[in-house]
Image (spheres, rainbow, N blue to C red):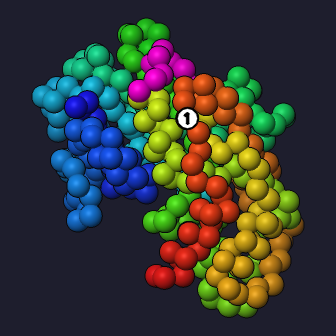
Amino acid sequence: MTRLLITGAGGFLGRYLVEEANAQQFQVTGVDRISRPHDLDCQWVECLLPSDEFESLIANTKPDAIIHAAGTASVQDSILNPFDDFKQNVFVFTHVLETVRKSAPLCRVILISSAAVYGNPQKMPVAESAATHPLSPYGYHKLLCELMGLQYAQVYGVKFVAARVFSAYGEGLRKQVLWDICQKILSGGIVELAGTGDETRDFIHARDVAKGLFTLITHARFDGGIYNLADGEQVKIRDLAALLSQAMDRSTEIKFSGVSRQGDPLNWQADIRAIRELGFKPGIKFEDGARGYAAWARSL
């Protein structure tokens, strides 16, 4: 079995990655600063990044692959605390790359990056070759992580690829737009949201994110490449709100402020031909995934 290490394994995406790794019979080790959640079945190392303990782990186990799912995932938090976001994203990932360079040079490294690097694309669907214009510190820091990975690939031969994940969602996610809308619907009254409602996102279920990342482990060349990971479809926020309201069986009035939040892009739709060519195909239709999410949120 391939020895796989997942950083940030206790987080939202990390938990789906552990589940998929087990399904594909990888020998998986989860690394996180928290204790192993009781429902995760894998080897577990509780440690901070960066740390001597992490360096020793890589030197002793020499994993075949690392999926880096650790780091921050909030645009708004990055605007409030940009230096902290830099440390938790760029500094931590560079430490992972340096540790691999020194102790496990054959290890394949996948960075979970973000569509935030694109900002507001000039053309959609947006391809990996499009210009990058981040709107937030978070977007800039993800782009810097990609550049650090490219540096280590080109200068030191580290086997690296990045997956630019678009709007990931799924049961267990207690933040971002689906969570926000569901909580406002459940609280009753008028649901007030930022923007105009015509903003679009390319949503992808976390299970499909996991499948896409394992497609990269199996089929990517690990030569510094970049891959979009999304459904490849646009969904308007007003349509999302209506769908969630219907799924929760609530007659809800939805209003939009007309003012977008700082750092939020207007429209996203990914060109996913590159990862499709490796064999990836999204398996969860957004309407079905959103209804499943609404049922989960309502059950809490």
Q: Which residues are magenta?
A: 218-226
Magenta stretch containing residue 25, yes or no? no
Is 144 in front, or is 180? 180
Q: In the image, is residue 110 above or below residue 194?
A: above
Q: Residue at x 17, y 38 (%)?
A: 53
Q: Is residue 99 visible?
A: no
Q: Label 1 belongs to which residue?
A: 280
Q: Amino acid at mark 1?
A: Phe
**Residue visible at 73% across and 66% down in the picture:** 240
Q: Is residue 150 left or right of residue 48?
A: right
Membership of 221 in magenta stretch: yes
Mark 1 closeness class: few <14, some 14–19, many ≥20 residues within 10 Å: many
Q: Quadrant of the N terminus?
A: top left
Q: How far across and down, in percent of the image, does residue 109 sit?
A: 38, 27
Give the side of residue 246 with respect to residue 48, left or right.
right
At x 70%, y 87%, the residue is: 250
Residue at image coords 50%, 18%: 224
Q: Position of residue 115 (x, y in %)?
A: 64, 41
Q: In the figure, residue 97 lies in which quadrant?
A: top left
- Please tell me whether residue 156 is drawn above or below residue 236 in the rendered image: above
Secondary structure category for the residue under label 1: loop
Quadrant of the rendered image containing residue 166: top right
